[in-house]
Image (tube, helix red, strand yellow):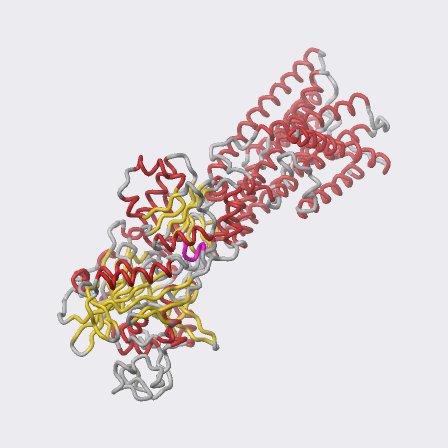
Amino acid sequence: MEFFQEPVEEILDHFNLNSDQGLTDTQVIKSEEKYGKNQFSPTEKVSLSKKILEALSEPMIFILMIAAMITIGMNIYKHLQGLHAEFTESIGILVAITLSVSIQIIMEGRSEKAFEALNNINEDIKVKVLRNGIIQYINKKDIVVGDIIKVETGDKIPADARIIECLQLKVDESMLTGESIAVSKHYDEISSNSKVPLSERSNMIFAGTFVNYGQATAIVTAVGDSTEMGNIASELKKTMSKSTPLQEKLDKLAKAISVIGVVISALIFFYEIFKIYVHNNISFDTVQNAFMTSVALIVAAVPEGLPTIVAMTLALNIIKMARTNALVKKLVACETVGCINVICSDKTGTLTKNQMSVIDVWNNGNLMTPTELKSRFMIENFTVNSTADINIKDGQIKFIGNPTECSLLKAFTDTVCSVNPKRCPHYELHSSVCQGKCSKYSSQESEYISYTDIRNASSIVFQYPFSSEKKSMTTVTLEDNNYNIYSKGSPEKIISLCNKIIINDKVEILTEELREKITSEITKLQKEAKRILAFSHRTYLNNHDDWSSVQNKIEQAMIFDGFVSIADPLREDVFEAVEKCKKSGISLKILTGDNIVTATSIAKQLDVVKEDSIIIDAQDIDEMSDDELIKILDNIVVIARSKPITKMRIVNLIKKVGGVVAVTGDGINDAPALKNADVGIAMGITGTEVSKEASDIVLLDDSFSTIVKAIEWGRGIYENFQRFIQFQLTVNLVAVLIVIICEILELPLPFTTIQLLWVNLIMDGPPALSLGLEALRKHLMDKEPVKRDASIITKNMLTTILTNGLYIVLMLALLIDKKVLGGTVSEQPSIIFTTFVMFQLFNSFNSRELGDESIFTNLLNNKPMLIMMSGTFVLQILITQFGGELFKTSPLSIVMWLKIIGYTFSVIVFSEIIHLSRRLIKKA
């Protein structure tokens, strides 16, 4: 069935639907069984065998495999010649390869699971649907064929659907058709004998596209893989697959170290061959030993596990961020968010609770409480000129829709829905028809009228949805052959449309004196940080074939009905979050659609207004040149009556002067600014799907404090990268220097190939990963942001790498040359090997602090590290005591173990002395 060619009635019959009821629970189950769920088939996972092949093709693993093959070949040849063949080392290399590949596959598997979890959160989109006669929100994946869905401005369409009702609907289908211009939609069937292109199916809406304007009700005709988007679903599976700039930077660092390591190893190999030649000692064994030493040094010197550790760290930390209500959609945001020095934030719902309540009503010339409201026109504006709904389920009331409209419905539901004649809002206006019940709205003799009674009794002809440009919403209804026009919006806009007003139940001329009185009342309330929403109406006699083109014409000579004040208190945690911003060098700019009086009140409550601070109206900004605006940009703290174009311009200028800016947004028109900002932050609760799609981070709780927490996480992740880089480079430095020193002094190499492989295996894994998962430090928000182009290896890190690395080299050199720990000659290889490993384990604790702080302050904060270090220590004991022929070790006594622990613990003491001396110097 080609749904776009069928009339609405035929489609309703096809799905056995009642347009007022939607699907029943039974129909939902049957539809899901027949057509499937609204999910794309998962990406085909890479097989285990392919993962193993990919891991084996890594350069370092490949080099080890060649080394293993060469040594096996040499030993087979020796065996055939009747010479002594030693296969232990070859087997050890193969075991090391197996362990390395296994660890890599396990870690990549955990990363994949982490990203899958994130993608599931990304797809957790709520859709407004009609089921069992009730409007409700359900998850996008639970939509089934036959569902009646409702979409409006800013929504992401969840499935392919046939429109059955719509008002001025325009849809962005560029991601399907390539057309950048939004497509106007209607609900009439398209009669055509030929195949109609996708772009011309103007009575259909398609999954993945966005509502640019208007609203619609539609019947779902296809879900999941059956949708048009399902045909190109593979494109959607690229989310979070690209490397971030920091990952690329670290990858380059790893490659640079690899080149250095390979060159040094090659030089040592040729130097060994030269010595063998000079001493006339060329044999299979000597050449093989020289080759294996060089290979082992390459493996020990090159941090080939760095990219895997980085990816794993990002994945696990992003999951932690999601648990704190900051959902990262793009990996690059993880590193950029830590560099932010300017936040351009909305007010409503971000700085405030978004729990709106109508506090005051100004009507009939007087300020009153909502319970005293009796104006039919304001009540119809509350209920009819609205897209909000109320869902009552299991005794629980849930408001669905725009928070401002919900507050109006709540005011109506709480205070004016009784139809007792003494409280009926229409009693004085039409008492002749209101006798214990409201016959205008309800045919049933019930005690209450619902907002749906009023809405259903009003024949809605057309609706002009709210837009940030118009700052108003208008609905046209038909009553007794006349048209009622209801408008609501900002007080400035609504007052400008009016020339009359209702005072003492009479329509009067809206004089300048009355305008000033209204403005004065509004200003008083705005100073209390209350939002104002104004209302107007008029009767209109003419019909229009195309109502969409006459908005400006009908919104004239209106009657001013009054206004309401809406309170939306500041979040309790926002004050602490703003203080953190101040301490951490982050400037806050509040960009709000509110009047300058309300915006100033909020800014003062947050204590962000200083003597030189500038509070400005967007209209004044529009009249300034970029050069003029740049001069005052740093001092601007509030922009009132901000428009999306204002936000975009501010973002561009902050970036132009070198700032790193985060911008919040929730509307469809915020998308350009969100995309253009260094970090775009969308609201997860009130935000449109367009804004979420354009953003880098989605706030699952819409809270400003979560933005600050995300910045803290960004800084913490960056520091964790620095921690394991510092640790790994110290290991690499020590391994290379020890081998070079031994070569120069013509001392025997202290480590066998298998021992170096073991060191590489354990140091590239558990310690590095656990450092990447360090808890956030308290000092993170007490310092200036890191510059985006700053080197990840700081001077302080380089100093620590050199001092700790050289200290370990010196202590190992003393051990090799002077045998300072004692022990028999046969025990020396075990002592040196174990001491080297223990030095690195203890030094990993030094890498937990990047500044001058003592490592003991946060010693117990990273339990995974303590567990991993303990496990590695136990493995080292087992290898030393029982490694025997494979690791070339011999058992050590408890006394010797205690000596080694004390000797290697000295690296912590040494580092603490360095840190203490730095702290004392700073205090002096």
Q: Residue at x 77, y 34 (%)?
A: 885
Q: Residue at x 34, y 60 (%)?
A: 157
Res 551 → quadrant:
bottom left
x then y, percent, for residue 429: 26, 80
Q: Residue furthest top?
A: 278
Q: Closest to the observer: 137 or 70?
A: 137
Q: Position of residue 696 (x, y in %)?
A: 43, 47
335 displayed left or right of 378: right
Residue 350 location (% of width, % of height)? 44, 55
From which residue to which does the magenta span run? 347-351
The reply to whether the magenta stretch includes residue 348 is yes
Q: Residue 782: horizontal and vertical position, in percent?
A: 56, 41
Q: 52 or 250: which is nearer to us?
A: 250
Number of numbered discs on residues: 0
Residue 401 inside the magenta-drawn segment: no
Q: Looking at the rendering, in which quadrant would you find the C terminus?
A: top right
User: Chief secondary structure of the magenta span?
Assistant: loop
